[in-house]
Amino acid sequence: MQARWAQRAHDIESFKVMDLLKRARELESLGQDVIHLEVGEPDFTTAEPIVRAAHVALDKGLTQYTPAAGIPELRQAIAAFYMTRYGLSIPAERVIVTAGASGALLLIFALLADMGQNIMMADPGYPCNRQFLRLLEARGLQVPATAEDNFQLTPELIEHNWQSNTAGVLLASPSNPTGTLVSPEQMQQISAVVRARKGALIVDELYHGLTYGVDAQTVLATDDHAFVINSFSKYFGMTGWRLGWIVAPEMAVPELEKLAQNLFISPSTLAQYAALAAFEPETLAILEARRVEFGKRRDLLVGGLRELGFVIPAMPEGAFYVYADASHLTDNSFEYCWSLLEEDFIAVTPGADFGNHQAHKFVRFSYTTTIERIEMALARLKRRIERGG
Amino acid sequence: MQARWAQRAHDIESFKVMDLLKRARELESLGQDVIHLEVGEPDFTTAEPIVRAAHVALDKGLTQYTPAAGIPELRQAIAAFYMTRYGLSIPAERVIVTAGASGALLLIFALLADMGQNIMMADPGYPCNRQFLRLLEARGLQVPATAEDNFQLTPELIEHNWQSNTAGVLLASPSNPTGTLVSPEQMQQISAVVRARKGALIVDELYHGLTYGVDAQTVLATDDHAFVINSFSKYFGMTGWRLGWIVAPEMAVPELEKLAQNLFISPSTLAQYAALAAFEPETLAILEARRVEFGKRRDLLVGGLRELGFVIPAMPEGAFYVYADASHLTDNSFEYCWSLLEEDFIAVTPGADFGNHQAHKFVRFSYTTTIERIEMALARLKRRIERGG
């Protein structure tokens, strides 16, 4: 009776953390106080000036389609931000507004990765990257990245793992789940290696703005041919609005625009008009205060976890994640996550959601909750360890 | 220097009307009064109760991610709408909220069409359907549908054109660009034919609610295994919000949910809370008044075009399109569209945007503008014909 599902539907995996989340909600409905350290979005709701801009747009009746690449004002505002933040002159025409970074990933991979080709990426990494490629009958070539290399691809790793059907390389800086950055020097060397192989370099700069004690440099500072993925979700705190952007090499713009027309028609109109307020000084001051708060949480969580014996081999300098080695407590981090939830009511994400390389050792802690809740979680972890687990 | 684009980027086409639109804007900036009969969205902005609900959601700080399949309240509201509108009991669990109908098409095709397979569809039809399949390394099997068959696939056409690698059939009722419907009897026969071949039946019900003198019946009335695509864009007037939905067979829901998690994370939060107001009596009264207005425009446009010698072989009973045969005036409807724009400042969409079958004869007129503007356009067309063109 039932139609057959396509093979890709079997191959594309769900996030393992979803089952944990479901169970967490059950526990909560039974009255348990679950501490959420698994969430991949800021606990702050959208900043007031952005919300205000949305109210104004609603009152103006701005509810219809926009151009596929976004409203010109927003493309210009994003381009101008590259000047104020990085001192770079980027023409607005190279900016394409997308339905979240998810939309940006689909467009870029659709443009670059032919059927049967692969895009190289670090393992561990954001799981959807390889799922997007599987969707397109291409493949994510996951290369084990070690703590010694900050969990990032290196020029050597890229040279060593390049295949005849490799179409390009995806970097994430700061990275989810590790919070680590690629240094400007490293980025420049990687550009050269990729260019020499006539591949494309894609850099996920989603967590730019959320760095602590260091500034993230955009790849565009040294490579005008790279594809940049960014988003209003994380630093700008607009997750539920589904708005992101691409900065593309000039020649790719008409192609991406054509794909965007067909696949999305246009990004959310209201989100676009709201996002115009994201670059205003008043908003940036709010975001800076939030960044400072995230930094305090990071210091507390990293320090607390290390005290409890977790190994955090590469200091997370950005995003809101700590990728911690729990192998002093378990040889199966997935089971450890379940037990942490069931016994101590702490929700974290198992390493298995981010790849295969040493995934059984690692768990990802998100500091997307308050200092008080993080302290509570550390206290619970301490008691657990005192119990011997 | 430049990376190579994937073959699919070459194959996926842009809409021909985009160049016309660009030229229309140039003409307007030169002071010309262009009448827009090419636009595929209602000229009405979103109804006030929906806008009001969005204001409330903003004030409540509802700006973060939702579940991938949508907020439970909205899934329930959509399910309840199937009871009030069609008298059908549909469990809310079978409803998946998507990022527009575009999101729905991507999810359904990703689930059903394996690499190298095809989905059968009528030519003429909505152009993005086949582009989504091309994206996935599958194919749209475009079957010429004639005016005698209301420009729709028939059970006979489906039987005749079925191939060993056909995964399913896509119908659109009402159809873009023709505004024609599939009758309930026809739909039931098609279900049987598709089921006998173990294929999937997908029905685009995007323009439901916008029918004139006839009610559109959902395929779900007679086929619980069909996939329905619908949207808040057209009838509900929420184009720029990017919100649609799927009703899927129960067994497909976990698969679609998993794909949605990976490809979209979640649909727009604000749009979802706003859409809760779409089913309220106050909103439906506004939408009904708009439908009546669309019906008057249709009658005016169809009558006026026929008087001018355009052949409209299948009466459009839904959507807001008239697919008119202009072969008494041209043997190249694409050039005709350009000349109509340059000489008479009327923008319409060439048949070539909707397929190949007799596309050179047809143009699509949208009645997404006022009665007054449609009258002006008819007067301009009359003068043009008097001039002999």
Image (cartoon, coloured by chain):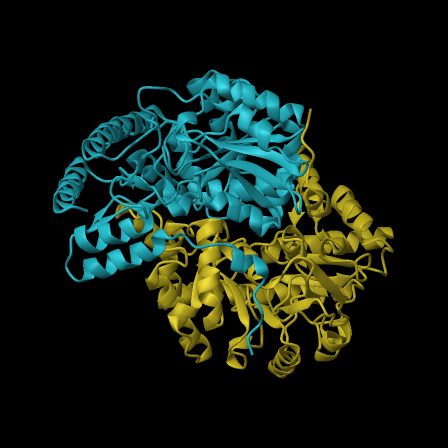
Chain colours: A cyan, B yellow
| Residue B110 spot, x, y in % from top left | 57, 58
Q: Find residue A233 and report its horizontal and vertical position in percent.
A: 39, 38
The quarter of the displayed image where residue A7 is located: bottom right
Q: Does residue A229 appear to the left or right of A258 in the view shown?
A: left
Instruction: Using the rendered image of the protein, determine whether residue A267 is visible from the camera's viewpoint.
Output: no
Q: In what quadrant of the picture does the N terminus of chain A appear?
A: bottom right
Which residue is at the front of the view, B158 or A334?
A334
Q: Can you give x and y, in whole percent of width and height, for residue B287 in the image?
A: 46, 64
Does A42 sit above or below residue B89? above
Front-most of residues B215 and B298: B215
**Going 55% across and 73% down the picture, which residue do you hit?**
B226
Q: Is residue A157 above or below residue B173?
A: above
Q: Is residue B76 visible?
A: yes
Position of A144 relative to B101 (above/below): above
Residue B10 placement, left or right of B240:
right
Residue plotted at (61% across, 62% down): B320
Instruction: Work out whether B89 lies above or below A110.
Output: below
Q: Nearer the viewer, residue B317 or A295?
A: A295
What's the residue at 31%, 37% (across, down)?
Answer: A325
Percent across and percent down for residue A80 are 48, 23
Residue B179 left/right relative to A130? right
Counting the numbered discs, the total is: 0
Camera-side residue of A380 and A368: A380
Q: Which quadrant of the structure image shows residue B368?
A: bottom right
